[in-house]
Amino acid sequence: MHELTKRGLRVERQVPVPIDYDGIRLDGGLRLDLLVESCLVVELKAVEELLPVHKAQVLTYLKLTGRRLGLPINFNVPLIRDGIKRLAL
């Protein structure tokens, strides 16, 4: 977050994600790790490898928030570029 704001980007962290169902707003306890410039969803991980469930989590966040671009980032890799996966709707 610090590196992004240092570069002049607006970053929000732990953004609540409400779930709208049948006209009712539910609090599902979902939170975005980072929301960059109100358009990029970033989900931070430190796992052995990014699994399909991690990608599904980001895709769910994109659908619920109406955003189109997401980045699950795994910090448990020798090179950070190997831990970044771009997902788009």
Image: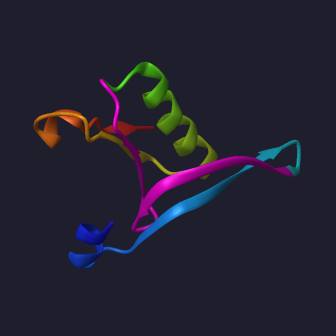
The residue sitting at 34% across, 26% down in the picture is 50
Q: Is residue 33 magenta?
A: yes
The quadrant in which the N terminus is found is: bottom left
Q: Quadrant of residue 74?
A: top left
Q: Quadrant of residue 2?
A: bottom left
68 sits to left or right of 77:
right
Relative to the observer, which residue lies in front, 19 or 76?
76
The residue sitting at 48% across, 64% down in the picture is 13
9 sits to left or right of 69:
left
Location of residue 77 in the rendering, given as x and y in whole percent from the top left corner: 18, 33
- Residue found at the very far top of the displayed protein: 52
Relative to the observer, which residue lies in front, 53 or 89?
53
The residue sitting at 29% across, 75% down in the picture is 5
- Give the residues drawn in magenta, as a range: 25-48
Location of residue 20 in the rendering, given as x and y in whole percent from the top left corner: 78, 48
Against 51, is 83 above or below? below
The residue sitting at 36% across, 36% down in the picture is 87
The quadrant in which the C terminus is found is: top left
Relative to the observer, which residue lies in front, 87 or 72?
72
Q: Quadrant of residue 48?
A: top left
Q: Is residue 71 magenta?
A: no
Location of residue 79 in the rendering, given as x and y in whole percent from the top left corner: 10, 38
Against 50, is 26 above or below? below
Location of residue 3 in the rendering, given as x and y in whole percent from the top left corner: 23, 68
Colour convention: rainbow
Q: State whether the magenta stretch is mostly helix, strand or loop.
A: strand
